[in-house]
Image (cartoon, rainbow, N blue to C red):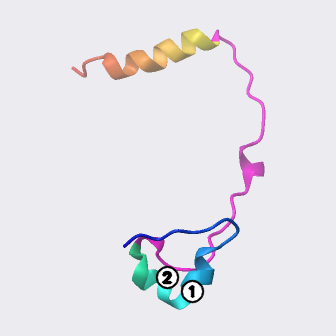
Amino acid sequence: MKLILRKGQMLGDIFPVAALSKVFPAAGSTSKRKKLDARKFVGVIKLTDDALDIQSRMRNEWNQDPD
């Protein structure tokens, strides 16, 4: 099935909201998701070492063999 939306046309104009989950199962439920509270992640960190040194140490942890 080929579906063509023209400029300014919404999917809801073609299919009713109740039928969307039957036609497009990947659409899932029509419930609203919680919005991300980005204020939790705002801030500044102070580094005592060089950022590249920290990054190389973190990457080396993956390469080391656990004995």
Which image quadrant for residue 53? Answer: top right
Q: Residues within 10 Å of mark 2 (few under 14, many from 20)?
A: some
Q: Which residue is mark 2?
A: 20
Horizontal and vertical percent for residue 52?
58, 11
Q: Tags 1 and 2 in contact by the CB under 8 Å rule? A: yes
Q: Is residue 10 above or below residue 60?
A: below
Q: Along the line of sight, which residue is nearer the eye, 3 or 60?
A: 3
| Residue shown at 43% from the left, 76% from the top | 24
Tell me the kind of residue under disc 2: Leu
Quadrant location of the C terminus? top left
Q: Is residue 34 magenta?
A: yes
Quadrant location of the N terminus? bottom left
Q: Along the line of sight, which residue is nearer the eye, 13 or 58?
A: 13
Horizontal and vertical percent for residue 66?
25, 22
Q: Is residue 46 magenta?
A: yes
Position of 29 with respect to 25 (left or right) is right
Magenta: main secondary structure equals loop
Q: Is residue 34 above or below residue 54?
A: below
| Residue shown at 73% from the left, 51% from the top | 38
Q: How many marks?
A: 2
Which image quadrant for residue 23? Answer: bottom left
Q: What segment is highlighted magenta in the picture?
A: 26-50
Q: Along the line of sight, which residue is nearer the eye, 48 or 43?
A: 43
Tell me the kind of residue under disc 1: Val
Position of 44 with respect to 61 (left or right) is right
Q: Is residue 38 above or below residue 23?
A: above
Q: Which residue is mark 1?
A: 17
Which image quadrant for residue 5? Answer: bottom right
Q: Residues within 10 Å of mark 1 (few under 14, many from 20)?
A: few
